[in-house]
Image (cartoon, rainbow, N blue to C red):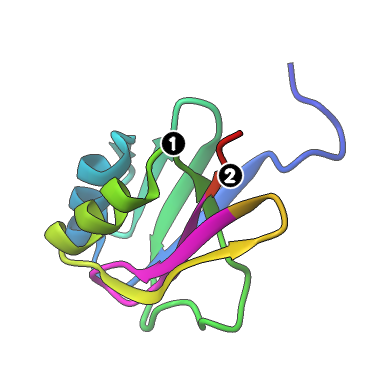
Amino acid sequence: MRSENRIDYVEIPVTDMKKSRAFFEAMFGWEFVEWGDEYYSFNDGRLDGGMRLAAEPAPATGVLLVFYSDDLERDVERVTQLGGTISQEIFSFPGGRRFHFVDPVGTEFAIWSEIPE
């Protein structure tokens, strides 16, 4: 059952469908359904979304999708091993830590973790 006033679907513009799919499958284990050459839908285990072919990556000044992790250091390593680049090293903020990265096709994301108690 859908909940009113909650984010229901996330759509990410990407410049290379296959490269983006491979990155997110390997990084987060997302499952995809291909709806032609220009649109893939995915599920991250909780939220549905899609990737649509775009002429250029989403601007870094736009909406930032932030993922949760139990191990930031592991994920910094995984991002770089999978062809992404770290755009902002791990930093602390009230209640947690996070880093920003750019995926292999040029879109920026972030991953955060709570500060262990």
Viewer-side residue, 61 vs 39: 61
Disc with the residue nearer the chain's start (1 vs 2): 1
**Magenta highlight range:** 97-112
Task: Inspect the magenta stretch and tell me whether residue 86 lies in it.
Answer: no
**Does residue 32 lie above or below 16 as drawn?**
above
Viewer-closest of 94 and 8: 94
Q: Which quarter shows the N terminus?
A: top right
Q: Residue at x 61, y 43 (%)?
A: 9
Residue beneath label 1, please?
Answer: 70
Q: Report the label total.
A: 2
Write the residue at 21% across / 52% down.
78
28 lies above or below 21 = above
In space, the residues marked 1 and 2 are separated at their CA atoms by 10 Å
Q: Residues within 10 Å of mark 1 (few under 14, many from 20)?
A: few
Find out whether residue 106 is within the magenta segment.
Answer: yes
Name the residue beneath numbered marker 2. Answer: 115
Judge depth for marks 1 and 2 and give the one in front. 2
User: In which quarter of the view is residue 101 placed?
Assistant: bottom left
Looking at the image, which residue sits at the far top?
Answer: 1
SS for dot 2: loop
* Residue at 32% from the left image edge and 72% from the top image edge: 86
